[in-house]
Image (cartoon, rainbow, N blue to C red):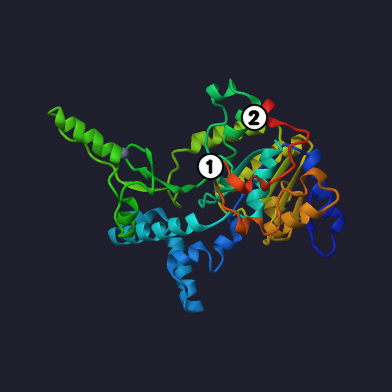
Amino acid sequence: MTITHIRLDADNGLLDYIATLFTTASKTVVITGAGISQDFRSRTGAFSKALGAPTNRRKAARDARWGRDMFQSSVLRHEGQSAAFYSYMTRLHQSIKRARPTETHLFLRALRDAGILVREYTQNIDTLSEQAGLLAGMSPIDADLEKRGKRERRDRRPHCVPLHGSLHYLRCTLCSRRHSWDNGNHELKTMDGYAPDCPDCADASVRRVRKGKRPITVGRLRPDIVLYGEADSRTADIISMVQHDRSLKPRLLLILGTSLSTHGVKSLVRDFARTVHDSGGVVVMVNRTQPASSTWDRFINYWVEWDCDAWVRDLMLRQSFPSKATELVRPGHAADEPAIDENGSGGSNGAILGSREWPIDLTSD
Ligand SMILES: [Zn+2]
């Protein structure tokens, strides 16, 4: 098998064919990377703002290297670098709070509403899928939830797995409990380069002292993300989620905005691709960068060389895409709508319309 390269100017028929997959393939697993948050990653986006505006190309390159260093686990082992890490992540968190979901994020939300999305596995820590209304989490089956109605099961079952964690929370290095970054004075401390004490550990220690016992060690809070070179305690949960989703026999694997460079994501794609092919389905990648044929020939059927948002906009306009779903994502919608309501349900992004009559409902699995 070779990867079919779909070029925009020459392959109208193939783009039409891809659009038909959303009815015939139905159950869809999506793997996403930085390319679906394009604006966020641009020179004027959150990562750049967290570093300050680059004054010239050389400084921009130096900043980029430095920004990458901030995601290495070794950064926490050196006091000076650790302070820079906390300060950088705080600025990044603040930028993320101002970021808005892209049309691709809203498209994934629409797939979920249509009952077509099995799960999004994302390498992004920017929480934009959650802002678009997807619930992030690690457990495919919740015994209590299984007793609820179909609609509630659909709305409360996690549909997004943040593979590398999320900058939305801080996590205790000792008790592993998560805390909102916005509570207390956490943000003031992290901006100054300090790791805040964990409130839970501190309370437990105070209670012990009141009982005449020795105080216990109080853990420190750190961003709830997985750094390069760091063991991920949630690996077993991710494996169990993947096994569950493979058992649903998805027939479409969409790879959006990632060049598949990390080991974990490579094996995730291979596993899902095998399942999808065994079910007679197809694997579609949308990304600017060409997948290496020596590595991906057996796994990826179609490579659409395009930006994800532009592809989503084109998809909406195609006759072969389900007509009920053509208003899923309004062009420009992502930029001018509030992203999330206080219930976390996506708020006025409910303008994602008309997709509920698609045929497959995963909530009955
Ligand atoms: Zn703790």
Number of numbered discs present?
2
Name the element at disc 1: loop
* Tag shown at residue 76: none
Q: Do we see residue 340 in this rendering?
A: yes
Give left or right: position of 12 versus 36.
right
Residue located beneath label 1 in the image: 344
Residue 227 % position (x, y): 44, 51
Whole-number angstrom distance, CA of label 1 to CA of label 2: 16 Å
Neighbourhood count class around disc 2 (C-alpha, 10 Å): few under 14, some 14–19, many 20 upward:
few
Amino acid type shown at disc 2? Arg
Residue 351 % position (x, y): 67, 47
Residue found farthest to the left = 212
Amino acid type shown at disc 1? Gly
Looking at the picture, tell me which residue is in the foreground, 350 or 76.
350
Residue located beneath label 2 in the image: 151
Quadrant hosting residue 13: bottom right
Query: Residue at position x 82%, y 45% from top?
Result: 323
Name the element at disc 2: helix
Query: Residue at position x 46%, y 76% from top?
Result: 59
Give above or below for 173 relative to 57: above
Q: Quadrant of ligand 1?
A: top left
